[in-house]
């Protein structure tokens, strides 16, 4: 039976020491970030995730969700009671605006909760998690009437939300959608069409479900420029806020899928359902990207979350499982074999996992700080800089974060050997659940193209140049024992700069050069971004060690893991640059028929 203990000590280290969140307390939007609240919230979030949600993780995987003949859906045993506890504790309102019933706690702390919930029970976390993206879109583009009608109940999680984008014939290319929105003359639209892969599309957790649906109005261009966004509630909402008649939207089926069985992934059928326009007609893409960007950061956290849960179980197993002897001689002569944690190859996998999980945790929480600054700073230039940096980092956190998160989950399964392949140990579920993170909310290939095709060139390259300056400044400000780490990071960012220049010189004439190298560039930037976090953590841990702390082992482990990261992860940047500079010739050279297997 797998276990999970929320990594509260590491989260506190990042939030309290690395980010020093309490020091922002005198700035707008950070007033609630007192040291006592920070520690209490992290502890309580960890307790809820570990004690309430984690025991339901395998239950949800085994049972899945059940669709009934009337189109209603029942979630797995225990999910409804756990969700009621989640709502009663106020977790849903954490980082939402106070004027709509939220607690105005910084997003940094909301992201900590999101990680803990996702590690404990990925499927459960998707129900309230998707609502956050819908809330963000309505906050940004909804009319006052829509906000007042829907947001208080969505923020309180009395009503949950969804994102209805994908259709059978279109995923990434949303210009191909066929769902229609016919104006009814009273300000409403009749929505007709079919959406697929709709996470949490139907369930029994909340009294209403608010669907945000992409559709095309009559005469709209047959492209992405013709897309509009609509609010389509499961139950219509009366003027006094009470629920009215059932809308003409129904779950047609639940997808049979590889993982996340505890979340209802639905085919949704709209048969003239009543909807309301969000924002301007044919401006739905802008609202969609607000939802997508929020969701992409959340998915990056999910990739880390599955890796963390798998890592914890692999460490426990490696300390107990006895096979063979250490290469340097028996570590435990009284036993017939040593624990497998003595073997270098097992250690390699565990160290890879530790370096990734702790580095990615620092990166996503630092990104969360940029969210808070972009939303709340009273300095316009600071808001812009934070928003630009966040835009640059979002595809990296989603793409690199989930590629590595899945790889770590697979390695942690490998630590178990044959037992990792057996369901009762739980490792194969971590692998299956982690796999979706590389696919949904934009496949990782799309993340790479977003980074290289849009974000690098945005505003004349201002964001990437600011990123390079930040790395250079961090490297230049490092001395003493940590200088070799800084030198390694300097070389890695040099590889990234060279790859960026190569794109500038070679992608314009042949765009396929960009497409062929985008994945590798995403990974270079992932290595460099985590390198920045590890250099900062190593500096901080070294300073703490000099003061003789009680928990010196924690800080020493940080320094050692940083050294491992710079020795084992950072050299990949050079090889990735070589792959980029190989161009697209060999990638695109074969005739399509050459991919067919000869008879």
Image: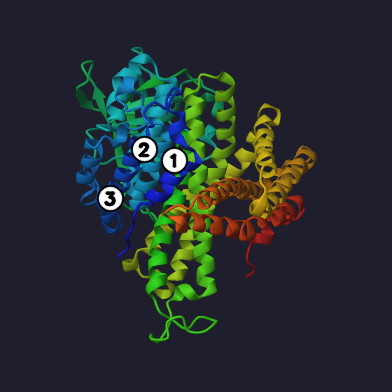
Residue 53 numbered mark, or none: 3
- Left or right relative to 87: residue 189: right
- Residue appearing at x 24%, y 40% in the figure: 205
Q: SS at mark 1?
A: helix
| Foreground pick, 194 / 420 | 420
* Category of crowding for the residue at label 1, using alpha-carbon neighbours closer than 10 angstroms: few (below 14), some (14–19), many (at least 20): some
The residues tagged by marks 1 and 3 sit, at their Cα atoms, a distance apart of 26 Å
Q: Where residue 286 appears, x then y in whole percent?
A: 51, 26
- Left or right relative to 27: residue 262: left
* Category of crowding for the residue at label 2, using alpha-carbon neighbours closer than 10 angstroms: few (below 14), some (14–19), many (at least 20): many
Dots 1 and 2: beta carbons under 8 Å? yes
Task: Answer with mark 1 or mark 3, whichever residue precedes in sequence.
Answer: 1
Residue tagged 1: 16
Residue 405 numbered mark, or none: none
The residue mark sitting in front, 1 or 3, is: 1
Looking at the image, can residue 256 be seen? yes
Task: Answer with mark 2 or mark 3, whichever residue precedes in sequence.
Answer: 2
Q: Where residue 225 appears, x then y in whole percent?
A: 55, 25
* Category of crowding for the residue at label 3, using alpha-carbon neighbours closer than 10 angstroms: few (below 14), some (14–19), many (at least 20): many
- Residue appearing at x 71%, y 57% in the figure: 575
Residue tagged 2: 38
Dots 1 and 3: beta carbons under 8 Å? no
């Amino acid at each position: 039976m797998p276990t999970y203990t929320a990594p509260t000590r590491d989260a506190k280290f990042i939030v309290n020491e690395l980010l020093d969140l309490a020091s922002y307390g005198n700035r707008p939007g950070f007033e609630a970030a007192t040291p006592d609240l920070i520690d209490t919230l992290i502890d309580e979030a960890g307790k809820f995730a570990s004690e309430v949600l984690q025991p339901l993780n395998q239950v949800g995987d085994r049972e899945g969700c059940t669709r009934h003949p009337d189109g209603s859906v029942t979630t797995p045993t225990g999910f409804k009671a756990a969700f009621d506890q989640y709502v009663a504790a106020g977790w849903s309102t954490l980082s939402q605006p106070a004027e709509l019933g939220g607690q105005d706690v910084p997003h940094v702390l909301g992201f900590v909760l999101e990680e803990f919930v996702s590690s404990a029970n990925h499927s459960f976390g998707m129900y309230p998690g998707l609502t956050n993206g819908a809330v963000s879109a309505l906050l940004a583009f909804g009319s006052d009437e829509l906000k007042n009608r829907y947001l208080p109940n969505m923020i309180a999680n009395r009503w949950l939300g969804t994102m209805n984008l994908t259709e059978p014939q279109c995923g990434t290319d949303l210009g191909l959608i066929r769902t229609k929105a016919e104006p009814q003359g009273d300000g409403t639209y009749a929505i007709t069409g079919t959406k697929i892969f709709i996470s949490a599309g139907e369930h029994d957790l909340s009294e209403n479900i608010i669907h945000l649906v992409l559709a095309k109005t009559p005469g709209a261009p047959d492209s992405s420029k013709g897309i509009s966004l609509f609010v389509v509630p499961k139950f219509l909402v009366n003027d006094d806020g009470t629920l009215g008649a059932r809308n003409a939207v129904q779950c047609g089926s639940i997808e049979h899928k590889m993982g996340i069985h505890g979340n209802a992934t639905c085919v949704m059928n709209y048969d003239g359902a009543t909807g309301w326009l969000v924002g301007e007609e044919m401006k739905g893409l802008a609202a969609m990207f607000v939802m997508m960007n929020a969701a992409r950061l959340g998915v990056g956290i999910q990739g880390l979350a599955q890796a963390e849960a798998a890592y914890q179980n692999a460490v426990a197993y490696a300390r107990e499982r006895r096979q063979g002897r250490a290469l340097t001689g028996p570590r435990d002569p009284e036993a017939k074999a040593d624990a497998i944690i003595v073997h270098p190859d097992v250690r390699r996998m565990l160290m890879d996992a530790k370096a990734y999980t702790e580095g990615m945790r620092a990166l996503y929480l630092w990104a969360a700080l940029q969210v808070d600054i972009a939303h709340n700073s009273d300095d316009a230039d600071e808001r812009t800089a934070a928003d630009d940096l966040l835009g640059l980092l979002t595809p990296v956190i989603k793409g690199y974060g989930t590629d590595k998160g899945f790889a770590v989950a697979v390695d942690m399964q490998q630590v178990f050997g044959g037992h990792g392949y057996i369901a009762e140990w739980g490792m194969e579920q971590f692998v299956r659940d982690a796999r979706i993170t590389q696919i949904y909310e934009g496949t990782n290939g799309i993340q790479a193209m977003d980074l290289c095709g849009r974000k690098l060139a945005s505003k004349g390259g201002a964001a990437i140049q600011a990123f390079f300056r930040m790395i250079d400044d961090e490297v230049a400000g490092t001395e003493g024992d940590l200088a070799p780490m800084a030198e390694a990071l300097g070389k890695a960012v040099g590889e990234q700069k060279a790859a960026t220049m190569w794109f500038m010189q070679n992608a314009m004439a042949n765009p396929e050069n960009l497409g062929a190298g985008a994945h590798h560039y995403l990974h270079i930037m992932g290595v460099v971004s985590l390198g920045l976090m590890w250099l900062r953590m190593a500096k901080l841990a070294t300073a703490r060690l000099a003061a003789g702390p009680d928990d010196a082992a924690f800080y020493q482990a940080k320094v050692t893991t940083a050294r491992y990261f710079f020795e084992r992860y950072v050299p990949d940047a050079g090889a990735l640059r070589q792959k980029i500079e190989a161009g697209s010739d060999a990638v695109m050279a074969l005739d399509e028929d050459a991919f067919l297997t000869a008879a």
